[in-house]
Amino acid sequence: MTKSILSALLLCSISFYASAQHKGCSTKERSMEAKLDAHRESSDSTKSRGLADNYFLWDQGTVIKVKFLSGSKELQNKIKPIAKEWEKYANVKFNFVTSGDADIRVFIGNGNGHDSYIGTVCKSIDSRDETMNLDSADVAGSDAFLKTVVLHEFGHAIGLLHEHSSPISGIKWDKENMYKEYAKIGWTKEDVDFQVFSVYKKSYTNGTKYDNKSIMHYPINPGETLDGYTIDWNMQLSAGDVELIKALYPMKGKRKNEVTRINILNFNGIRLEGNEVKMGISLFPAFDLKTGGIGGRVKMVFKFYDQEGYGFEDEDGTYEENGVVACLRTVLLPANKTIRYNQNNKKDFEFFLPIDQIPYEALSQNMIVTFKIVYETSEKELKNLYSSQPMQFSYKKK
């Protein structure tokens, strides 16, 4: 049986090979299937510059809880006011807490690099895991560089993307030279292609200009481009950053370029039952779904894998997604509503898979099941709005 890998940890990481300081960060989007790289092209009414993933923006006025998982008090106290600089222009607040649950969980370590999940993606990450990393060794002794890093990472945390990945940047990378340089830190050609050279589609832009002064732009050093184009470190928010974030999180009125956004609340697991009457498996996910932005049609998908995390191969093309056995439902979501599914032991939202879609030998073993919610953009791209952690189940007849 040809097998499809269950999951991929998608990193967008860069190390500055010519300096002790990391060149940028790792923007992470954890998905069970593929890149969260599709974006909806909407009417562009902003004059600002910059890239943002509008599908993972926080609601306006959100108080975002932030908790440090490590690091000295001295360094933590330096980070807090820097992060809060975004609050001057964005209609969100960072509430730094020392206990309980938190939306953004910051791990400060020595040599671990800098990275952050994009916007509300952090809400789907296991509450025991960090959602942002800051490298204490990389910023040691330089308050200016600390400011650059913190502004950059918290920019990701409220939905911003790397400006150098703009489709209108026109950067002429010297790819062969950079392949050689990044090979020194163990990166393959494929790593560099994805992490450095990939660009977003034009629909990711929230304006028509490329901003090389953005805090979200990496420096470009001599020898990295074919035409000698270089950019020094950007140490503060640019005018474009400010205008962009004001458009995405306005203090008053509606945000620009609104899209279909969802927030999964009170996820109480999935009930999987053998259904002898229908000769198959019934699944009942229990969760609340809060919609934001505008309404839209989404696809809710269950996919099935063996104990090693490989997808069961679809044999007949009837219950599948990308060749992996799956069952799904298409749902039209209204805007700004909260919808309850299968809560309080109810069974009001069923998914069904015929038993003959699962290999016979797998029925006596634990299976891994994932659940995701997918939106198809106007560009016919698929956007994972939500991806569950993998869950283990065994088949039981009812």
Image (tube, rainbow, N blue to C red):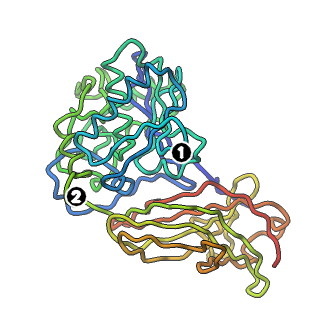
Crowding around mark 1 (Cα neighbors within 10 Å: few <14, some 14 to 19, many 20+) is few
Instruction: Inspect the image, locate mark 1, and give the three-letter code of the amino acid beneath it.
Output: Asp
Height in image: 135 above or below 344?
A: above
In this figure, which residue is indicated by the disc labeled 2?
Answer: 256
Height in image: 215 above or below 263?
A: above
Of the two numbered discs 2 and 1 in the rendering, the one whose residue sits closer to the viewer: 1
Quadrant of the image occupied by residue 216: top left
Instruction: Inspect the image, locate mark 2, and give the three-letter code of the amino acid beneath it.
Output: Lys
Label 1: which secondary element: loop
In this figure, which residue is indicated by the disc labeled 1?
Answer: 101
Q: Position of residue 332 (x, y in %)?
A: 43, 77
Q: Please give the name of the residue rendered at 24% of the width and 35% of the height, measured from the top-left corner.
A: 214
Q: Nearer the viewer, residue 180 or 371?
A: 371
Q: Please give the name of the residue rendered at 37% of the width and 37% of the height, measured from the top-left corner.
A: 154
Quadrant in the picture for the N terminus: bottom right
Q: Position of residue 109 (x, y in %)?
A: 53, 24
As drawn, the residue found furthest toward the top would be 141
Q: Please give the name of the residue rendered at 34% of the width and 56% of the height, measured from the top-left corner.
A: 59
Q: Is residue 190 visible?
A: no
Q: Earlier in the sequence, mark 2 or mark 1?
A: 1
